[in-house]
């Protein structure tokens, strides 16, 4: 079944897949607040409380699914829910040429404190994740944790809590280079 709408003198046709994606994108505005324990401590999507002991933690991030020879691979660490996905919220960030099908980054955090790792392949080297109609990324992207490939990333879905010492993280890029 194909749906059609009339706006501004134009007819827009939608397949069921596009209609489902539009509904998913609009649903993001309806997400509830992050869960917390009775004492106010934040809880991750897994239900585990976020404990803060603050010892140094090293995140060894391996990014897979890169299309070699196209642009840069950018990796950012977010350590604050309030500034998540803003340029000012990047606690640490690195870029490397997309020379191979995988890239490695080393980021530094504090153990027991929730962080999010974000990566994307910047095909046109404009330092931004390009988006198409409906805000859907047009460049390959990925996050730590368990982000939904159909919804914008949320802190709760993407946050991880590193342990003291070395932590291994593997992120597979979602989407293809076009």
Image (cartoon, rainbow, N blue to C red):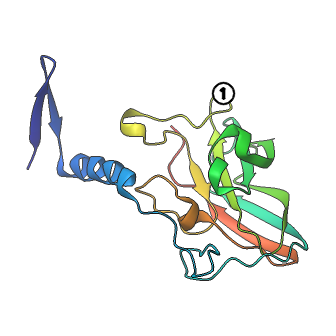
Give how far across and how far down residue 145 sits, in percent. 60, 68
In the displayed image of the protein, which residue is found farthest to the top? 9
Q: Is residue 101 left or right of residue 151?
A: right
Q: Which image quarter: residue 69?
A: top right
Q: Residue at x 42, y 38 (%)?
A: 135
User: Residue drawn at (62%, 74%), measured in percent from left and top?
Assistant: 40
Total numbered badges shown on the rendered structure: 1
Q: Residue furthest front?
A: 39
Q: Which of the 4 image quadrants contains residue 129?
A: top right
Q: Determine whether 119 is above or below 64 in the image.
A: above
Q: Residue 132: give x, y in percent of width and height.
A: 42, 34
Query: Does residue 66 show up?
Result: no
* Residue drawn at point x = 52 percent, y = 58 percent: 154
Q: Is residue 74 left or right of residue 65?
A: right
Residue under label 1, please give it.
Answer: 126
Q: Residue at x 40, y 56 (%)?
A: 150
Where does the image place residue 26, in percent across and percent down from the top left? 32, 48
Please determine whether, in this image, residue 95 is positioned above or below residue 57.
above
Residue 84 lies, in percent from the top left, at 63, 50
Question: Callout 1: 10 Å neighbours few (<14), some, many (20+)?
Answer: few
Between residue 68 and residue 80, name the one nearer to us: 80
């Amino acid at each position: 079944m194909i749906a059609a709408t009339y706006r501004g003198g134009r007819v827009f046709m939608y397949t069921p897949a596009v209609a489902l994606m539009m509904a998913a994108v609009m649903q993001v505005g309806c997400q509830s607040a992050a869960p917390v324990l009775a004492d106010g401590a934040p809880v991750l999507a897994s239900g585990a409380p976020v404990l803060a002991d603050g010892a140094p933690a090293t995140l060894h991030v391996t990014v897979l699914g890169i299309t070699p020879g196209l642009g840069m691979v950018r990796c950012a660490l977010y350590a604050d829910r309030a500034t998540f996905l803003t340029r000012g919220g990047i606690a640490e960030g690195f870029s490397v040429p997309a020379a191979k099908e995988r890239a490695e980054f080393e980021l530094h955090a504090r153990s027991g404190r929730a962080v999010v790792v974000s990566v994307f392949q910047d095909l046109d080297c404009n330092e931004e994740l390009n988006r198409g109609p409906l805000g859907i990324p047009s460049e390959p992207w990925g996050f730590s944790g368990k982000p939904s490939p159909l919804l914008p990333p949320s802190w709760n879905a993407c946050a991880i809590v590193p342990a003291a010492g070395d932590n291994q993280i593997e992120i597979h890029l979602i989407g293809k280079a076009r």
